Image (cartoon, grey):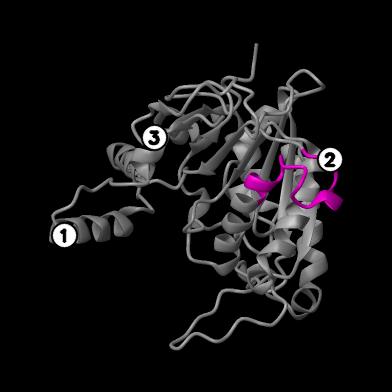
């Protein structure tokens, strides 16, 4: 039986240890290392979301695997130093090599789900997505592919994006949809019976590290130190918008955070993994403008929202495996 966590951090639902007919029973703990699977849309997402906590858990002996839904083939080259003809011509292979390097830096395993990047449509009107891309593949097909990987990997914890995708890229939204559908199907032996023996993960989380609260805290810390803040224009825009709407400056999803994983000691590893995605990340960009010591003092965690749990737990948590460890 499911124990969910409402936005105030209160567990709801009935006893998750109940075994009445038809109820989901989480897979056992103690059959090997604890296992964590992050489901991401593109290569580089694993290094910009949850990377420091991934590195921490991997260093502690957790088996961490990144499932990457697409190859990132349609991504733009965002680092001007890499915008060269030979890179453009071989972008798919280069992005795979970048992913391998980032995984090595983080100490995690990585698998490709095998779908084609949908690209980010721009313009007015926006162009149609290319036939066969990830966002247009029938949901049952992509869900079965993820179910097969989850049953093979047998994770105790799964993470992905919320229904907005974190930002409105069609692949991010589709990654949420596919992961949500797989979460419901993976433990049911009658669903996708050819995808391997059923396995039910215990907990599902959404990434919540890109919060207004965090950016405002980092901005204030930089201003206090007399360091130019890369967030000043964004916060000014937020203030103007919220004042005109009569709203709070830090509304949802900040209030949805249930779990803050301390991982400041791994911020440098996170940044090195991100820099490994050289076609996507300019090492001289604003991504790296906040000194690591300021980040560690101000916001030493990566943040998540627990959206489903089949084991007893309560918020606030400091561990994605709360309720699973002895």
**Residue, x 64% and y 35% (percent of image)?**
22
Quarter of the image with the N terminus in it: top right
**Residue hosting label 2:** 197
**Residue hosting label 3:** 6
Of labels 3 and 2, earlier in sequence is 3
What's the distance in space between the residues labelled 2 and 1, CA to CA? 51 Å
Give whichever of 4, 107 is nearer the camera: 4
**Residue, x 65% and y 29% (percent of image)?**
56
* Nearer to us: label 3 or label 1: 3
Q: Is there a contact, CB below 8 Å, between mark 3 and mark 1? A: no
Q: Residue 171, position in %: x, y?
A: 60, 65
**Residue hosting label 1:** 245
Quarter of the image holding residue 30?
top right
Q: Which residues are magenta?
A: 182-198
> At numbered mark 2, what does the secondary structure look like: helix, strand or loop?
loop
Q: Is residue 19 magenta?
A: no
Give whichever of 206, 17 is nearer the camera: 17
Quarter of the image with the C terminus in it: top right
Of labels 3 and 1, earlier in sequence is 3
Local crowd size for mark 1, using a 10 Å CA cut-off: few (<14), some (14–19), many (≥20): few
**Residue, x 63% and y 51% (percent of image)?**
179
Residue 70 visible? The answer is: no
Q: Is there a contact, CB below 8 Å, between mark 3 and mark 2? A: no
Q: Residue 258, position in %: x, y?
A: 43, 32
Q: Residue 225, position in %: x, y?
A: 32, 37
What's the distance in space between the residues labelled 3 and 1, CA to CA? 26 Å
């Amino acid at each position: 039986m499911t124990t969910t966590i409402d936005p105030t951090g209160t567990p709801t639902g009935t006893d998750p240890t109940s075994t009445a007919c038809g109820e989901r029973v989480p897979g056992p703990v103690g059959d090997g290392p604890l296992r964590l699977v992050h489901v991401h849309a593109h290569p580089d997402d694993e290094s910009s979301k949850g990377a420091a906590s991934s590195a921490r858990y991997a260093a502690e002996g957790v088996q961490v695997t990144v499932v990457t839904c697409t190859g990132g083939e349609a991504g733009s080259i965002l680092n001007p130093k890499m915008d060269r003809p030979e890179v453009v011509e071989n972008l798919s292979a280069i992005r795979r090599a970048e992913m391998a390097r980032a995984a090595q830096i983080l100490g995690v395993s990585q698998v490709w789900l095998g779908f084609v990047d949908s690209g980010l449509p721009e313009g007015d009107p926006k162009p149609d997505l290319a036939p066969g891309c990830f966002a247009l593949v029938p949901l049952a097909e992509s869900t079965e592919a993820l179910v097969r990987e989850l049953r093979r990997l047998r994770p105790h914890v799964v993470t992905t994006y919320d229904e907005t995708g974190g930002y409105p890229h069609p692949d991010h939204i589709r990654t949420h949809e596919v992961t949500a559908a797989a979460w419901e199907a993976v433990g049911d032996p009658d669903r996708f019976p050819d995808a391997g023996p059923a396995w039910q993960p215990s907990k599902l989380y959404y990434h919540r590290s890109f919060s207004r609260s965090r950016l405002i805290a980092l901005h204030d810390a930089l201003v206090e130190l007399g360091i130019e803040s890369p967030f000043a224009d964004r916060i000014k825009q937020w203030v103007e918008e919220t004042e005109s709407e009569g709203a709070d400056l830090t509304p949802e999803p900040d209030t949805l955070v249930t779990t803050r994983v301390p991982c400041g000691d791994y911020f440098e590893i996170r940044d090195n993994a991100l820099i490994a995605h050289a076609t996507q990340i300019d090492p001289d960009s604003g991504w790296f403008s906040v000194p690591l010591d300021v980040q560690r003092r101000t916001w030493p965690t990566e943040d998540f929202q627990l959206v489903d749990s089949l084991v007893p737990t309560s918020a606030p948590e400091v561990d994605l495996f709360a309720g699973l460890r002895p």
